Image: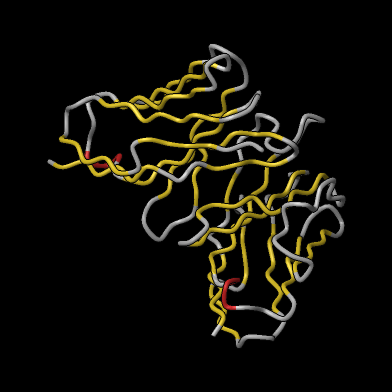
């Protein structure tokens, strides 16, 4: 079966533009996660979804960031009015299930290849 | 606020040797995760440690968790070149995962 896929693999945009990053999780995985990896900040957890809902959005860096998941499958991370500090690799992961205790749930997370975002 | 610190951040070792990477976290966390990342690649999940005293092993890697000491270790036995990568630990707290800085491991022949 296919793994987690992300698109685009690379995105170069100009400061102030909006971008959409897409994640297709493994079929049947109810939990989906977004992370960001940059040289300055290391690995950051952004948001996770249980089904279509995101219980906690406080990890998003600013109100320019939003994420949604429809049909319990594909998720889109949108960054409005991009800034240079948004440049990073955005990673998506999914896992089979999650528990009330929080993300991860003890299940293995499978990561996508990432989207490298460069804001000029 | 949950903080996670790894040490060492850089580790160069010879094949055949043993070494340990340490992961300390600042507040109570019931789950600890270890990941591997090869250069230019995404993350690979290695271990999930769910309870105090948990120990998991896969090949030459063994991870353990001491929730009382807020410490997890990743032990490498008889290192081989293929284990060269960056290793991250992450602790779970307040509905999110907090990552350590990563340990860049280089294994020399």
Q: Quadrant of the C terminus of chain B?
A: top left
* Relative horizontal placement of residue B54, taking residue A45 as reference (left or right): left
Residue sitting at the far top: B53
* Relative horizontal placement of residue B95, taking residue B15 as reference (left or right): right
Which quadrant of the view contains residue A8? bottom right
Q: Nearer the viewer, residue B20 or A58?
A: A58
- Residue visible at 70% across and 42% down in the picture: B96
Q: Is residue B45 above or below residue B72?
A: below
Residue B39 image position (x, y, % from top left): 36, 56
Q: Is residue B17 above or below residue B14?
A: above
- Residue visible at 57% across and 14% down in the picture: B68
Q: Is residue B68 above or below residue B76?
A: above
Residue A77 image position (x, y, % from top left): 73, 66
Residue B103 image position (x, y, % from top left): 37, 42
- Residue visible at 70% across and 31% down in the picture: A105
Q: Quadrant of the N terminus of chain B?
A: top right
Q: Is residue B83 above or below residue A17?
A: above
Residue sitting at the far left: B109
Residue A5 image position (x, y, % from top left): 61, 60
* Relative horizontal placement of residue A52, taking residue B29 as reference (left or right): right
């Amino acid at each position: 079966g296919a793994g987690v896929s992300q698109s685009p693999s690379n995105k170069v945009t100009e400061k102030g533009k909006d971008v959409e990053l897409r994640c297709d999780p493994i079929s049947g995985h109810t939990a989906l996660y977004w992370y960001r990896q940059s040289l300055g900040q290391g690995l950051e957890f952004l948001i996770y979804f249980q089904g279509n809902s995101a219980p906690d959005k406080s990890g998003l860096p600013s109100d320019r960031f939003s994420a949604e998941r429809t049909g319990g499958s594909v998720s889109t991370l949108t960054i409005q009015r991009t800034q240079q500090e948004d440049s990073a690799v955005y990673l998506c992961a999914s896992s089979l299930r999650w528990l009330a205790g929080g993300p991860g749930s003890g299940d293995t997370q499978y990561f996508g290849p990432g989207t490298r975002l460069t804001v000029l | 606020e949950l903080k996670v610190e790894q040490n060492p951040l850089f580790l160069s070792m010879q094949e055949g040797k043993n070494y340990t990477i340490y992961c300390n976290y600042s507040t109570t966390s019931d789950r600890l995760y270890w990941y591997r990342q090869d250069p230019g690649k995404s993350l690979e999940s290695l271990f999930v440690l769910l309870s105090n005293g948990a120990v998991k092993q896969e090949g030459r890697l063994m991870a353990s968790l001491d929730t009382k000491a807020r410490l997890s270790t990743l032990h490498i036995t008889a290192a081989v070149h293929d284990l060269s990568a960056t290793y991250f630990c992450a602790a779970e707290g307040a509905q999110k995962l907090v990552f350590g800085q990563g340990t860049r491991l280089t294994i020399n022949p």
